[in-house]
Amino acid sequence: MTASPAQADHALPRGRPTTGAHEHPGANPRTVVRQTAAGPPAASFAERAVARLSRLLGRRTSTRRSFLYRAAVVGSALAVDPVGYVLKPGTAYGSVCGAANTCSGGWSVFCCTINNGANTCPDHSYVAGWWKVDASAFCLGAPRYYIDCNRRPNRSCRCRCNTSGCDRRRTCCNVFRYGQCNTQIKGVTAVVCRIVTCTPPWEWDPKCGRTVRTSESTRTHTSACLPGTNPSRIEIKYQDMGLVGSVLGRPATYEHKADRGGRKRRYDNGMILWHRDHGAHEVHGWPATRYRRSGAEKGPLGFPRTDHRPVGDRSGQVIRFERGSLYRRFGGSTRMVLWRADRRYRTLGGPRGRLGWPTSDTRSTTAPGKVTTFERGAIYMSPKTAAIEVTGRIADLYAELGGPGGSGLGFPTSRVRTLPDGGRTQRFADGLIIGPSPRRVHAVREPIRRRYMGAMDGPSGPWGYPITDTGTIMGKAGLWNRFQHVVAYWSPDAGVHWFERGPIYRRYRTHGGAAGPLGFPVTDQHTTGDGRQRVRFQHGTITHDPDTGTVTVS
Amino acid sequence: MKLTAHGLAAALPGGWEGTITAEQAALVQGHALSADPRAQAPPTTPVAQFATFPLPASRDDFGGEAVEGMGPDDVFMSLLEYGSEEVSAALFSDVGLPRRLDPRAFSPRMLHRRIAGHAGLQLFFHDTGRAFCLYVVLGNAEDAHRLVRRAEQVLATVEIEPRA
């Protein structure tokens, strides 16, 4: 998840806050004295000026503005609340900015009005508390939350009225605190301005508590820089992120239709997309560029299902989509992990799991299927096999042998299994990789694997572990594998047969092995009636007499 | 008249009325747009309000429109509890419900919403393991000494029970 606007923009001062102190009522805001020593509630020059301005503005309506400005406000009123503006008595200002929008109304101004359009706390303020209005038309019937930004204890600000636009409320005047946020800061300072969100404050900023306060009086309060009533989900999302003060920056397009009934809008530094199944979510920065290049919601990822979320140790971020995720390690590339590979990766713990960060996008392999590589392994999948990880030396060997297309092993069909003797084995569609330890493994392809793991009981049987990978025979259709105690051969005509790595094998090799005149073995090594060892080949026989040590080829 | 609810009690002198309520069933709606599906409803916390004028049925936690009609002799007080996790926070570090108020501490600026003629005071504290804010509005800033004594009459009767 991305940092909330409060986290990103309104970090609190590192210094120890002033303790046990309150503002001297009516004094210069920088003057801080003990509450018990506070003077009488005398009005300062600023207070008197504000009061005078309040009276002046309180009498003023839009009818006293210039024609053009009045026309603009009326236009806004008609756009924001056409029925209310036409049918109800009141001013255009009231229709756009709600009730008590003048300085004399006594309320605090909205932050976006005085903060260059940003729905965030100005630098000299911090999030101090919040209240809500239930069933708000500004939040599609959900509660609307108003979050006060109060002056930081070590900063100053002058009490004044905003004098432009229709939100002409007060800033830095009301010394008041709702008190649910940043309660590590003692004391009460002036409210600089108010933020609005449709997201509960305790989710919007973890430094806000959940004690609910309500103020029905503020139901209609708003500003021309905020979305109007019945906003789109994208407008709400952008508002809650901070409008132009968010990581997205300013809007670059109008909101428009997206694929499959969705909606989207682009901004200077990203986009927000909405789909009824997933809600509105934002993508910004490099992931946004990567997402757009892959086709955005029409591409393999589909619509976003989350915002940016920090990964465990905050070394990067992840955004989940309908059919995959984008992962970005800070200082690294953005990687796209798709479909079942992403599900499996997340099951394994994602970037903090045993595979580490992705080092490639999910991409096609030479055989029909996909691979995604990671710092410590890879996940393979095919139309016929699940998404399965291959890690450690097995992953290295599999890749060296050519992976799904070149190794002859096909795609992995099971995860690594530890054998009773501590060995490791992993099955593939056309073989297995096996060894006595994680670092010493070899490949055994079908059909030698079937004989090895079936009738011959695998590594605990007479063959032992393989000591080579399955090899091919130059110029012939066939395979061979050397094991700890035997050598096994396979040919389409003769099937799989084996013999010990002894005199018969040595003689066979001097005759060129399977590529030589004897061809492939057609029997296993066996003992004859007179006690000799014998193997029959396609074009001959090798016999070994253990009593005399003689080896004959016939 | 003695009010008792939610671990708070007050014996109101003549001319005062009050309520003690707890927030608030409609909160669950608050999660309609919440990004976190595991979000739970916020805890309920009591709000006690005392006034020397008729309190409307619907009013804000800090008075809202209810204080607009205050006369120059009127006093409004709201005692609001916060989540118990706040007891140790710096904001609530002062100890004990203030029974005596300094009239000089009241200011026209220390109001939830500035209303001409009014003066206010807001104090955060903890008492018997519970975190509170006391908010007092005087109908006439120029008459703070007399109105503060009226507020103190009620504060002297307020009892806060330890959180169960």
Image (spheres, rainbow, N blue to C red):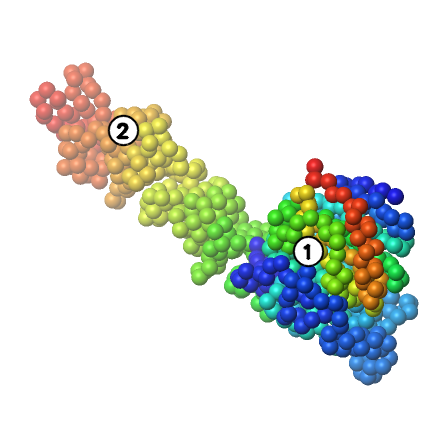
Q: Secondary structure at mark 2?
A: loop
Is there any visible trace of residue B137 in the rendered image?
Answer: yes
The CA distance from mark 2 to mark 1 is 75 Å
Taking depth in this image into account, of B142 and A75 the one nearest to the observer is B142
Q: Quadrant of the C terminus of chain A?
A: top left
Residue A501 location (% of width, % of height) = 19, 31
Q: Nearer the viewer, residue A151 or A209?
A: A151
Left or right, A280 with reference to A462 = right
Report the side of B50 relative to A395 (left or right).
right
Label 1 belongs to which residue?
A179
Chain designation of label 2: A
Q: Amino acid at mark 2?
A: Trp
Q: Determine whether A309 is above or below A54 in the image.
A: above
Q: Give me the residue at 33% from left, 31% from top.
A: A422
Q: Secondary structure at mark 1?
A: loop
Q: Nearer the viewer, mark 2 or mark 1?
A: 1
Q: Residue furthest left?
A: A548
| Residue that label 2 marks | A463
Disc marking residue A100: none
The image shows residue A292 at horizontal and vertical percentages of: 56, 63
Q: Amino acid at mark 1?
A: Gly
Residue placed at 19% from the left, 15% from the top? A529
Q: Is residue A71 left or right of residue A453?
A: right
